[in-house]
Amino acid sequence: ARTVTRNTDGAAEVGGLDVRDLAEEFGTPAYFLDEEDFRARCHAWRDAFGEGADVFYAGKAFLSRAVVKWLFEEGLNLDVCSGGELAVALSAGMPADRIALHGNNKSLEEIERAIEVGVGRIVLDSFQEIVRVAHVAERLGKRQRVQIRVTVGVEAHTHEFIATAHEDQKFGLALAGGQAAEAVRRVLKLDALDLVGIHSHIGSQIFDMAGFEVAARRVVSLLAEVRDEHGVELPEIDLGGGLGIAYTSEDDPAEPHDIARALREIVTRECEANRLGVPRLSVEPGRAIVGPTAFTLYEVGTVKPLEGLRTYVSVDGGMSDNIRTALYDAEYSVSLVSRTSTAEPMLARVVGKHCESGDIVVKDAFLPADLAPGDLLAVPATGAYCRSMASNYNHALRPPVVAVNDGGARVIVRRETEDDLLRLDVG
Ligand code: LLP
């Protein structure tokens, strides 16, 4: 993300804008997303993978119409995993052939819509879905490009709930035991399906390339098996997303160029070893593109020192705008941004305003001991899986997303209002 500078008052500035003015204009809590940084990351991924590969941004990390336009302009494709994400993508003008549809339980409506509009690929996740997608395509008189999602049996070193390639979970068809090979057999028999490749996604917030290495090796050996059994060389491999970002100074993420080089090398080497042509590679980064581009701005409401323990600092949001700490024990950092302070640091826990004690935004943080109501705190790296996983718990109004550009800021997702909440109540 762009470096945050301090102005002569000691307040932080982003893109030349004082955070106190941002808070005044847009209210708190709010997410501020650096458009230039977002575009630069898209560009870096695109550039790193080059013409021979595709980068599908994973819309689940954060999606809005503005984001779709930026992706389109920067030459990225888009991975959606629900009818809702597909609707946003189409309404913002993403060409359907640049969209991939994922999901372990796509509804008939979702499948129909996707095939009707002509999405570039549907990633098949089960035997039943193979039949379902084929039926719809046949009925609509179309031949649908599909990939098969396989689980490669890798333990990604990440939180259990965001690791997806081990065998005991709901996604994909296992390579082990021949499920994946059987799926290939069934898909190849169906005229309405055009099998273009194999997909693997091993998990999220991963730093170690070893998992991708194993995944690539196993996916390529499936391609070799398919060639041997059916005489077909499938032209595509997708290795999913999952590249980690720095939430705190302890994380050290790789650059897109290094990731691209590593993946290309692994795939090329494995293909050569199996005497296969090198398939077209695609990846699906979500967090790595949008995560670092945004921070959440909160206002401090109450400060409660607990003798001998720590000080609880309550802000005006919480688990409704960032569930990740409560859900995954995620680590975040936080800083006082409306002023500088020379006060001693105190051990603090930044908590939200929701009615439960697990409502924690930042578990352990050192903040100045003179922290007071009205101070503004910024939590960086909240671009991914914060607004997209935001909820209305306690009838909270979900915060806006404000795109910050050099010298300007504009709302790209507005703050919810009480009317928004009441509109859903019937009677
Ligand atoms: N492709 C597939 C098939 C996926 O399932 C995912 C994430 C991605 C790509 C993008 O992964 P990324 O590059 O963003 O790590 N809510 C969790 C993360 C769940 C991710 C689910 N799938 C979190 O807040 O950490």
Image (cartoon, rainbow, N blue to C red):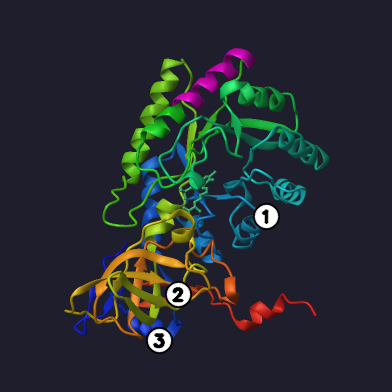
Q: Is mark 1 within 8 Å of ligand 1?
A: no
Calculate the distance from the C-alpha at mark 1 to the C-alpha at mark 2.
Answer: 26 Å
Mark 2 highlights which residue?
30
Element type where label 3 sits in the image:
helix
Crowdedness near tag 2: few (<14), some (14–19) or many (≥20) residues, C-alpha within 10 Å: many
Residue at the spot 42% in from the left edge and 55% down from the top edge: 329
Residue at the spot 65% in from the left edge and 37% down from the top edge: 124
Mark 3 highlights which residue?
24
Q: Amino acid at mark 3?
A: Glu
Quadrant for residue 185, please give it.
top right
Query: Where does the image place residue 3, in percent across and percent down from the top left?
Result: 26, 66
Element type where label 2 sits in the image:
strand
Mark 1 highlights which residue?
83
Q: Which residues are magenta?
A: 217-230
- Where's the C terminus, which quadrant? bottom right
Marks 3 and 1, the one that precedes in the sequence: 3
Q: Are marks 3 and 1 in contact (CB under 8 Å)?
A: no
Calculate the distance from the C-alpha at mark 3 to the C-alpha at mark 1.
Answer: 36 Å
Marks 2 and 3, the one that precedes in the sequence: 3
Calculate the distance from the C-alpha at mark 2 to the C-alpha at mark 3.
Answer: 11 Å
Q: Which is more toward the observer, 74 or 290?
A: 290
Crowdedness near tag 3: few (<14), some (14–19) or many (≥20) residues, C-alpha within 10 Å: few
Q: Amino acid at mark 1?
A: Gly
Q: Which is more toward the observer, 413 or 245?
A: 245
Quadrant for residue 129, please give it.
top right
Please say whether residue 228 is one of the residues in the magenta stretch.
yes
Q: Outermost residue toward the front? A: 308
Does any portion of residue 42 appear in the rendered image?
A: no
Element type where label 1 sits in the image:
helix
Overall secondary structure of the magenta section:
helix
Residue at the spot 71% in from the left edge and 78% down from the top edge: 423
